[in-house]
Image (cartoon, rainbow, N blue to C red):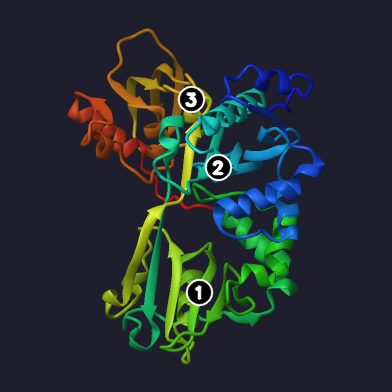
Amino acid sequence: MRQPLAYDNVDRVVDAIPLPEGITLRSARDDDWPAMRRLAATCFGSFRDPDTLTTWRSMSPREGVILGCDGTDIVGMCMLLDLELTVPGGRQLPTAGVTWVAVAPTHRRRGLLRAMFTGLHQRIVQAQYPIAGLLASEATIYGRFGYGPATTETALSIERRHARLHPEVPTIGGVRVVDPAEHRDHLADIWERWRRRTPGGLRTPPQLWDEVLADRASARHGGSPLFCLLHDDGFVMYRTHDAEAGKSVEVTKFTAVTGDARLALWQTLLGLDLMHTITVGTHPADPLPHLLADPRQACTVSSEDALWLRIVDVPMVLAARRYSHDVSTVIEVSDAEFHGGGRYALIIRDGQARCVPSDESPEVRLDLSVLGSIYLGAHRPSAFAAVHRLHCDKPDLLRHLDLAFSWEAPAELGFGF
């Protein structure tokens, strides 16, 4: 069970971290947030709405922000959110969501990021979060800290006027056009059902629903207010945008608990006759192309990593998820930066794992970042073995690991943070 931070010694822990010359680390205070907002805007290119910032701030535990300071100037920061992550099999794990990682352009390449990350991860361990996650603005940074990309988001685009349903697809129906704010409880219930069955799903606290349904102009990026299509077992929220070719639809949330709900919602979206294109972020195994008479009309316009995971408590986290195949082996996990690895006997029987420290010779060797990448089932161990990032001399064992870590429900990022 996760414990609260021991507030009496967190700054002493930070004080023990080697720092660049002239830099100090400390926890954030209430009067630091305007300067933090400006630093974030400088690094990420836009100012976050103050009310939106209040929402995210409410999700951060006390002592959850570390600042890097040059005199009185805030020149670096990193923050953790108190999240809850669904893993294969439906268990939810307390998760440290790492966000707002920024270093001023005046202070790059001095080791400030490493120092802040060291302090933040000491707090993560101290608070007994078993796992940590983040979204990486730069993909080359976080692997060395033991994070691996664990979900992939694929953006699909459909030219609606050329898309036709496959003739064998039945008409489902049951979709209503609604005001999302008036159906908050139903939307939240559907989301909760979805996230409890989806690896990568995240609990959405009430204040975050408040933020989504506030539909602030700053969140629209030139688009319309939110539209909402509601089914008993699913919903779609979307915006429209004006373009030279005509109006386009940007789906901001597509959540379906059943296959029929997914079909019904897509049938309704494809019935928006005056819209030119529809774009949606989804997972690589989305069956959407098979819904269409011409599957080429569902064009992949991008595919990139989404949620990155660092496994903090290896035995606990490996035992928390369910598995699809039996395996018995010894793994050696390396973690060069924070020394969080070890050697473990991993025994999987009837979907459940037992993971304990071991002195036996390892049959599988991998970095902690690779373990994070395969944990939710989105990536196969054999893919990392092919590029010598996972080492296993037994082909049969490697095949068994592929089967064991796979999962029937595709992993998806619950929401960006």
Q: Residue 313 in the image: x percent, y percent? A: 53, 25
Q: Is residue 5 above or below residue 412?
A: above
> Which element type, helix, strand or loop, lies under badge 3?
helix
- Element type at mark 2: helix
Task: Give the crowd class for mark 2: few <14, some 14-19, many >=20 residues within 10 Å.
Answer: few
* Above or below, comparing residue 268 to residue 254 in the picture: below
Residue 18 spot, x, y in % from top left: 57, 19
Labels 2, 1: front one: 2
Of residues 130 and 24, the one drawn nearer to the viewer in this rendering: 24
Left or right: 23 in relation to 395? right
Marking on residue 250: 1
For the residue carrying disc 1, how many other residues have a C-alpha within 10 Å: few (<14), some (14-19), or many (20+)? many
Position of the N terminus by quadrant: top right
Q: CB under 8 Å between callouts 2 and 3?
A: no
Whether residues under marks 2 and 1 lie with C-beta atoms below 8 angstroms apart, the answer is: no
Give the residue pinned by disc 3. Answer: 314
- According to the picture, the residue beneath numbered tag 2 turns out to be 106
Report helix, strand or loop for mark 1. strand
Front disc: 1 or 3: 1
Which residue is drawn at the image coordinates 61% and 81% (left, top)? 176
What's the distance in space between the residues labelled 1 and 3, CA to CA? 39 Å
